[in-house]
Image (cartoon, grey):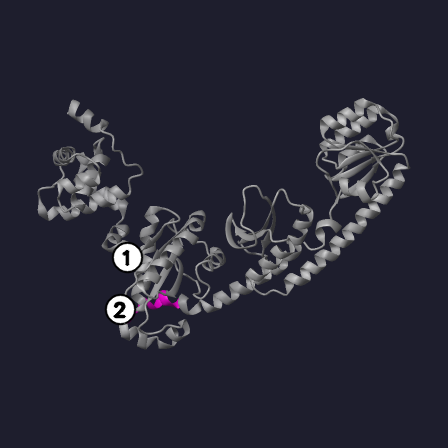
Amino acid sequence: MRRSKNETRLDVAGLLAHGSLRGTTPLYLTPSSGLIESVVLVSQLEAIRQVRPNTVVVLSSEMGSGGWLVSAALRQAWERRASSVIVAGSAYASAAVGLAERLGITLLATDGDPAGLALELAAEIGAALSVVDAELARVARTVAKDTTLGDVLKTISGELDGVGVSLEYDGVVLASAGMPPRDTDQVITVEVDEANSAVRFTLAARVPISGVHNLRLVRSILEVATPSVKAAWLLEDLLSAARAVPTATIPGLDQDGDASGSEFEEKHRHLLNQLGWRTGEPYMAVWFRSGQVQDHRPELTAVLRLLWRKVTARSPLAEVQDGWLTLLPAGNQDASTQLETRFRTRLGPALAELGLVAGLSRWQEDAPALSVIVREARLAAESARSSGPGTVLGFASLGVAAATTFVNKDAVALVAGLTLPRLMASPDRDVIITALAAFLDHRGSVSLAAKSLNLHRNTLQARLNRARDLGVPLDIPSELLSVHLIAKVLRRSMPDIRTSEDALDNQKRHP
């Protein structure tokens, strides 16, 4: 804060050494010097109840004449977190000094006129505040010169001697500058919002607790910088929205009957030129969407665009129906893998906080049509919802297993209840369904399925026999596909997989 450290921070120790308090006599000094932001001359005890924290309470000559009044003033000043209490005269009973020590509040005495001392101290505070005003005006002019959000945050951090400054949404850091946060930092925040907007950002500074910063001045600097932060954010969001217009049209074109291969590229050549699309180069699509059905919140667009800058600033993010879409060059397969890893590490936790998931298309050397990679990313995002918020799923790791995502689990449960009523009513249903799914996943191999479930082969065989007893047609080849689908969908919808043997043992004892 350039000049703010010493010139704008007033404390008891500094003013005792070379300020208006140097003529007073310390009766008790706290180990840490109290910050001074205001002064009040008190002639009635009740007035102390109205003072603000970090205030010097000066007792009038009449107030300081009685020992009990000083004791009462000390107690009330301590409750109001005053910086110190000043009394007239230097001869005071040890009881008052002892009380100040027990409360932990500085007690000073002046031989002069208390009113004169209060006026001198007020003038010194006013001079410091004028320096603060000049400093704040300079900071406002400085940050107003920056046009990007990153530059604005860097300037604010520089004015605060490099402390960490961040723009946040609901606890998620969207952009930051300065020192990384520490658990011991004191966090100062101000709100950054726009009229009639559902988005409420927070501008935060994380100040080392052992530092010399005036926390009130830190807040003031954040407040005067807020208009520049808001302007930079709105400008970047406006530019990002304009750049994303071509991308936003892609999902609609994806339904076009001719939207594939060279025909698509020929038909939409102008659009692809706007996207910067280079024929023959591999690209990847990323699709964000909410982790809950029909929970798309349009106000998250600005938030996601800021988050996306942590991955790349070159590819715009477009708000589309049911989510958000972006397209980016994939390079070679290694670069694509690194991009996916960076995506998970930098955005995964933030997506979890926001209740979002993401799907990525596959890297393919033969550069598939644009419509293909968009479909893959969308399917991967839809499939990721079953794993919960924060999931980042690549279509390459999903493949045909995505098909079960789009099967209505309630309809499957209804079919299972009608066709396999004994299984669905059995207390060991979940154990049996898990065994069925593993057995059919491994193409009927009892050994491989048992190994995947960490079971003995005979245990799994017993569960499969139990499934047959409950009416599951495991020995009819034409029905195995349906059984497999039912087992997979029911297995995926289980809130808790029970591996206990209790249910099976109970069935054996009470068939």
Indicate the amino acid at tag 1: Ala
Above or below 280: residue 495:
above
Q: Position of residue 191 (x, y in %)?
A: 60, 51
Q: Secondary structure at mark 1?
A: helix
Q: Position of residue 511 (x, y in %)?
A: 15, 25
Residue 484 appears left or right of 361: left
Q: What residue is shown with label 1?
A: 396
Above or below 238: residue 174:
above
Give the residue drawn at x 22%, y 32%. Answer: 428
Q: Is residue 249 visible?
A: yes
Residue 201 appears left or right of 329: right
Query: Badge 1 local density, few (<14 within 10 Å), some, or many (20+)?
Result: some
Query: Badge 2 local density, few (<14 within 10 Å), some, or many (20+)?
Result: few
Report the disc number at residue 366: 2
Q: Position of residue 250 (x, y in %)?
A: 37, 67
Give the residue drawn at x 57%, y 41%. Answer: 184
CA gap, disc 1 to disc 2? 15 Å
Residue 471 appears left or right of 224: left
